[in-house]
Amino acid sequence: MKFTKKEVEQALKTITAPGAGENLFDSGAISNLMIFGDEIDLDIRLQNPTLQARKKLEVAIMQVIHKKVYAKAKIKINTKVEAPKKAATISKGKPLPGIDSIIAISSGKGGVGKSTVTANIAVTLAQMGCKVGVLDADIYGPSIPTMFEMEGARPLSTKKDGKSKMAPIVNHGVKVLSIGFFTQPDQAVIWRGPMAAKALNQLIFDADWGDLDFLLIDLPPGTGDIHLSIVQSLPLNGSVVVSTPQKIALADARKGIAMFNQENIQVPVLGIIENMAYFTPSELPDKKYYIFGQNGAENLAIDKKVPFLGAIPLVQSIRESSDVGRPAALQDGTPIQKSLVDVTRNMVNQLLKRNINLPPTKAVEITNLVGCSAIK
């Protein structure tokens, strides 16, 4: 007796797939159906049924085909069990009231100027009229207090909603908190990961940050416990990776980008900043010496398909101003200030694009930038 594929399909539509609430065809359980004379070859995909349910389904298929199609049909059933896909557990924390955007600034390698870039972007944003805070999350090597002329300073206690909170210290229009405020200059912080994470959470949640347009987090170099603690504690709006053009630094910067792109982290990389991009002697203002290589970070940005936020030259005044606690962004009308303004504006533009094009982590809308010209 000859029978058609359509007859077999109609018969199989009378059977409900296990756990699907639909028939075998509508649920997509039948991945392949072939007929060779009186032989029927069936491939079935099921999402992790019990052995008993699978056997019961196979018996039901043979019975309905023998009854409704052909009693002597030879049926071969190939069952493939697929485990249901688990949704990625994304590490996201709770938002800080009054803070619009939280940006992590990182580097894969130490010594590329990440903290210097953080301090100068913060001051640039403050000069644009934004309300800015900096959290120095480099627990083992805090340098932000030095860069903001705050060495030896201690945060005062303040009351908020009946609770005692730390009041960040303010200089150059930027609110700052750092573990460096609670240690001596020659004191090494020798803590295991859990203790460092606890101290970091106190700096984040036991502080009275007030209303901020931006909270910049100066991460330690590399990828480790502190980075994971941050992404678990706070809903980061984005991250920025700082690197020099040097090949060795770029290799570590790749790892930093990969960390933020991890399935269980998924923090958008707003872009890469190339620090120490070139050196121009004061006596040769039109000459550029590419001491650490040329366009390395820009090429990495192209390769990893992330924005290139700009290049900051290697200038002696940047080092000098950082050492005395007056970031180079305060040097009005200088080429270095212009490069910092360009980098900062590019970062904010990428943040705005991120907020428009990607779903919110928690509270991603920029709402309090009335006086902040960074977005204009």
Image (cartoon, rainbow, N blue to C red):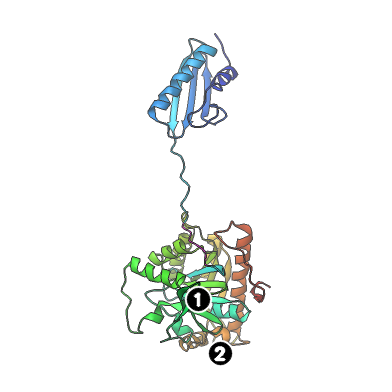
Q: Which residue is mark 2?
A: 282
Q: Is residue 220 visible?
A: no
Q: Is residue 225 above or below residue 376?
A: above
User: 169 or 358, which lies in front?
Assistant: 169
Relative to 321, 202 lies left or right: left
Q: Earlier in the sequence, mark 2 or mark 1?
A: 1
Q: Nearer the viewer, residue 278 or 72?
A: 72
Magenta span includes 67: no
Q: Tell me if mark 2 has few (under 14), some (14-19) or many (20+) residues whose alpha carbon lies within 10 angstroms of its own.
A: few
Q: Is residue 188 visible?
A: yes
Please state which of residues 158 and 350 is positioned toward the viewer in this rendering: 158
Dominant SS in magenta = loop
Asked if labels 1 and 2 touch by Cβ distance under 8 angstroms, the answer is: no
What residue lies at 38% left-to-right and 28% top-to-bottom? 51
CA gap, disc 2 and disc 1: 32 Å
Q: What residue would you read off at disc 1? A: 134
Q: Is residue 27 above or below residue 306?
A: above
Coordinates of residue 41 in the picture (x, y in percent): 48, 21
Q: The disc labelled 2 sits on which kind of residue?
A: Ser
Q: Residue furthest front?
A: 162
Image location of residue 182, percent across then percent down: 38, 80
The question of residue 94 being in magenta is answered with: yes
Residues in magenta, as a range: 91-96
Tell me the SS state at disc 2. Answer: loop
Is residue 227 placed above or below 338 in the rendered structure?
above
Q: Residue at x 47, y 50 (%)?
A: 88
Task: Identify the amino acid type marked 1.
Answer: Val
Name the outermost residue toward the bottom. Answer: 283
Quadrant position of residue 99: bottom right
Under circle 1, the secondary element is strand
122 displayed left or right of 195: right
Name the quarter where the C terminus is drawn: bottom right
